[in-house]
Structure formats: C-alpha cells, structure tokens
C-alpha cells in the first residue's frame, strides 16, 4: 500500500503540478530498520542499570558465556546488540539494621565489585574496560571495546560509615542508589518492607545521615540515584544535592501509577536539577499486569517462599534457575510489556521535562526485560521504536547515553571544584 505522501505525490503528478518543494516521501515500515540500524551503530548506547548474579565472574557465570534466556547480559550479547556500555550494579539486599548485617552488606558489596573488576581488569580486558569518568567512556568506546561502569544499589552497603563511600568510589563506583526495597539509615523507600512490618514513612523523607551521604557523594563526584526512594526522599535528595541527580531505573506515574515510578513533581525537580531519569524496561512498572498473570506469578513465589531480595539472595543458583524457568513459562502465556510501552514512558518524560533529561535502561538480571528487549542482543529494537516515533539521531544519542555522560561529567567537575576549595 502506498504511503499517504506517495499517494499525494501521485495525485499532484497526475495534476501536473508536482514540484521540488513537495515534502520527501514518507519512509515505509520496511525501510525503517535500515535507518534505525545505522543510527544505532553510530550512537553510544549506555544501559544505566544491569544487575549481576552472585556467581558473576566465576566459571558458573562467565560474562563471556552467560546462559540466555535466564541471564540477559553477556559480552557477545552486548556486542551483537550494539549495547556499548552498561552500569554493572553492586546491589546489596536490605536487612535488619544491626552491626552484623552492616558488615555482611559491606562484604556483599566488595564481592560484587571484585567480580566486576575481574571481568574488566583480567578475564575480559580485551573486550571490555572499566570507565571511571565520562571521558573514559568515550575513550574506551572509541577504542572498540565495551564499557563497564559501576553503580551501587542500596546505601545500606555503607552501614553508618560515611568513609566507606570514598572506598567504593576509589574502587570505581560512580553512582549511589540511596535505597532499595525497605527503609534504611539514609531515608524512606518507595516500597516499605512487609517482612519488617514497616509503615510508609520512618524518616519523613531523607534522614540527617542521608544528607551527609549526599554531601560526601557530591564531594567525591559520585552521582546520587533516587530510584527506589519514596517520593519525599527523592525530592529531599534532589534539593540536598549540589550536583544533578539521576534515577537509574524508574518509570513514570503519569503513564502507570506504581509506587516505584516517579511522580510529575519528582520528574520536574529532577529535570530542573539537570539530572536524568532512565526509563526502565520493567514489566510491572510500565503497565498494569493482568490479574490472571499476577495470580499465576504468585504460585512459584509461594513455592520458594520468595518475598523479597533477601530471599532471592539465599536461593541457590539451581533454585534461581528453576524459578526463572517457571517465570519464563508464565511470561510466554501472558506476554510482558512491549518496547512500545517503554517508549510511551519515554515520550511522557520527554514531554514533561525535555529530551535532555531522559535515558533508557533494562534492569536486566534484576527483574527487567520486556517483549522485544529481553536480552542485551535485542537492544536495537529500542532504537527502532524511537526512530518509528520520530526521534532524530541527535535526540536518540542523548537518550541512549549523552544525557547520562553530561550528568556524570558535571558531578566530576563539581567534585574537582570542591577539592580546590
Ligand atoms: Zn532496583
């Protein structure tokens, strides 16, 4: 079927009034992938939040030979999918706040940092390098390798020790996700812990310790990440931070009302700070999951007594694989949200706070992954949908990483200025 523009051109030609000022013929659906592929190859694509399993960097989970579909990021997948860079996440599960658990959280954080560093520093140094600055990202990318960055998820990894932040920074961590599910010493979580019978607010937003953490992060040049924070905590953090703030993996309430998604107020504040929200490919944040599917998902969760990330952390690799296979079967019956849902959230955020303040992330291996973008090797599909919606190459380059690198460079510059004082 001819496109409308072609039909119009034909009509004008028939009338003998065709002239050079006519708009170019609209692109057909069949031509779109070619242009999207070319754009995707030219832009630097950064995924701002990718989790690693506990056995990452071991023979059981060599990032060069990860086993799809259970695990969604590996080096061959990044290369094939044109995913140039990723923040590999140092996640620690929120537990009861006591000295033993603070020590355990610190140990968990060091183990994950070591696993990522073994990938970048020894095991696969020829294919992926660790970036400590925004300039490093561009340099490593220009040299033809993938780029690894490190982000931390859950300030519980600090315990009550501010100095640990400097240690994590020295090892390469470049953003701090203040919270995970459950309140911590830094502030209130978007999702209070049911296991610990938490009410919606413990601190009324950010705590005094949280303010000190943000001031130290600013001094170091580590970005502050408000994903998982309660909206009051996020707003407090954005006000407290001297540097622009990020949400490394969130979606927006304006499209789907979920406690993990950002309100318009938080989005506007984050945009005004100069920051970036990376819209996350996470099924239940993007749209309402059908009731039958929610019921079906409850069964394997009950079977493995899987209530939160702490339970996930204690499961063996074999148990996790079994659970993931069950989950995948349910997803086949009731498909997850699509790339189109993801870009609906991108469109909304761009409309509200502008193209300079939006990014993209998968949350692979942390519950993320949707129809069409369920493995790093499918990353082109996101660009394809952006092109289909009319985003230009320059806009796509900003969404895919330019914005994040601007925030990272700003955080670095502010830290350098602090040092001068
Ligand atoms: Zn998360």
Image: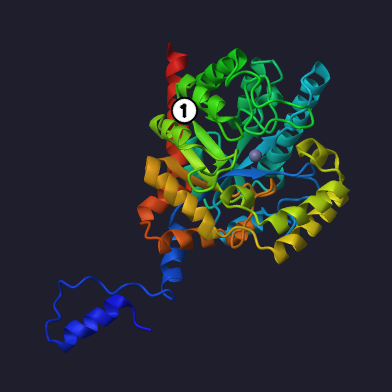
Residue drawn 83% across and 52% down?
A: 300
The crowd level at tag 1 (other Cα within 10 Å; few <14, some 14-19, many 20+) is: many
Query: 246 or 230: which is nearer to us?
Result: 230
Q: Position of residue 262 (x, y in %)?
A: 52, 38
Q: Quadrant of ligand 1?
A: top right
Query: Residue 261: image x %, image y %?
Result: 56, 40
Q: Is residue 59 visible?
A: no
Q: Is residue 131 visible?
A: yes
| Residue lying at the far front of the rendered structure | 291
Image quadrant in which you'd find residue 327: bottom right
Residue 62 vs 420, above or below: the answer is: below
Where residue 109 appears, as percent x and y from the top left, is 73, 30
Camera-nearest residue between 367 and 333: 333
Q: Total of numbered circles in the picture?
A: 1
Left of 413 or right of it: where is 379?
Answer: right
Q: Looking at the figure, which quarter contains the N terminus?
A: bottom left
Q: Residue at x 18, y 85 (%)?
A: 13
Compared with 164, 112 (above or below) is below
**Residue 26 is drawn in which quadrant?**
bottom left
- Which color scheme is applied? rainbow
User: Quarter holding the C terminus?
Assistant: top left
Q: Residue at x 87, y 45 (%)?
A: 316
- Label 1 element class: helix
Q: Is 270 on the left-hand or right-hand side of 17?
A: right
Q: Position of residue 283 (x, y in %)?
A: 62, 52
Image: 274 above or below 145: above
Pick the front one: 129 or 278: 278
Label 1 near ligand 1 (CB < 8 Å): no
Q: State the residue position of label 1.
A: 411
């Amino acid at each position: 079927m001819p496109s409308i523009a072609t039909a119009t051109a034909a009509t004008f030609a028939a009338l003998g009034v065709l002239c050079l000022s006519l708009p170019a013929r609209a692109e057909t659906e069949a031509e779109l992938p070619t242009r999207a592929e070319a754009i995707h190859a030219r832009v630097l694509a950064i995924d701002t939040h990718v989790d690693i399993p506990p056995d990452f960097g071991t023979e059981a989970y060599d990032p060069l030979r990860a086993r799809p579909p259970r695990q969604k990021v590996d080096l061959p997948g990044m290369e094939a999918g044109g995913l140039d860079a990723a923040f590999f996440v140092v996640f620690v599960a929120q537990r009861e706040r006591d000295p033993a658990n603070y020590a355990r959280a610190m140990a968990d954080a060091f183990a994950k940092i070591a696993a990522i560093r073994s990938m970048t520093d020894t095991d696969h140094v020829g294919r992926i390098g660790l970036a400590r600055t925004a300039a490093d990202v561009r340099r490593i990318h220009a040299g033809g390798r993938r780029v690894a960055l490190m982000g931390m998820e859950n300030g519980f990894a600090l315990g009550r020790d501010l100095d640990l932040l400097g240690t994590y920074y020295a090892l390469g961590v470049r953003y701090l996700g203040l919270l995970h599910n459950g309140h911590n010493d830094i502030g209130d979580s978007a999702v209070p812990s049911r296991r610990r019978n938490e009410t919606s607010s413990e601190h009324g937003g950010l705590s005094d310790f949280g303010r000190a953490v943000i001031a130290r992060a600013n001094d170091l040049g580590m970005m502050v990440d408000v994903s998982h924070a309660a909206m009051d905590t996020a707003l407090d953090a954005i006000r407290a931070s001297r540097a622009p703030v990020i949400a490394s993996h969130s979606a927006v309430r304006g499209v789907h009302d979920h406690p993990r998604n950002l309100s318009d107020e938080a989005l506007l504040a984050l945009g005004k700070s100069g920051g970036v929200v990376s819209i996350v490919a996470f099924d239940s944040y993007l749209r309402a999951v059908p009731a039958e599917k929610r019921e079906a998902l409850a069964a394997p969760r009950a079977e493995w007594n899987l209530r939160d990330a702490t339970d996930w952390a204690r499961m063996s690799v074999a148990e996790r694989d079994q659970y993931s296979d069950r989950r995948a079967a349910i997803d086949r019956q009731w498909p997850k949200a699509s790339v189109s849902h993801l870009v609906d959230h991108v469109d909304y955020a761009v409309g509200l706070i502008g193209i300079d303040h939006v990014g993209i992330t998968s949350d692979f291996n942390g519950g993320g992954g949707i129809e069409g973008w369920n493995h790093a090797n499918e990353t082109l599909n996101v660009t394809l949908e952006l092109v289909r919606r009319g985003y230009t190459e320059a806009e796509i380059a900003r969404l895919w990483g330019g914005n994040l690198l601007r925030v990272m460079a700003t955080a670095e510059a502010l830290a350098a200025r602090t040092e001068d004082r």
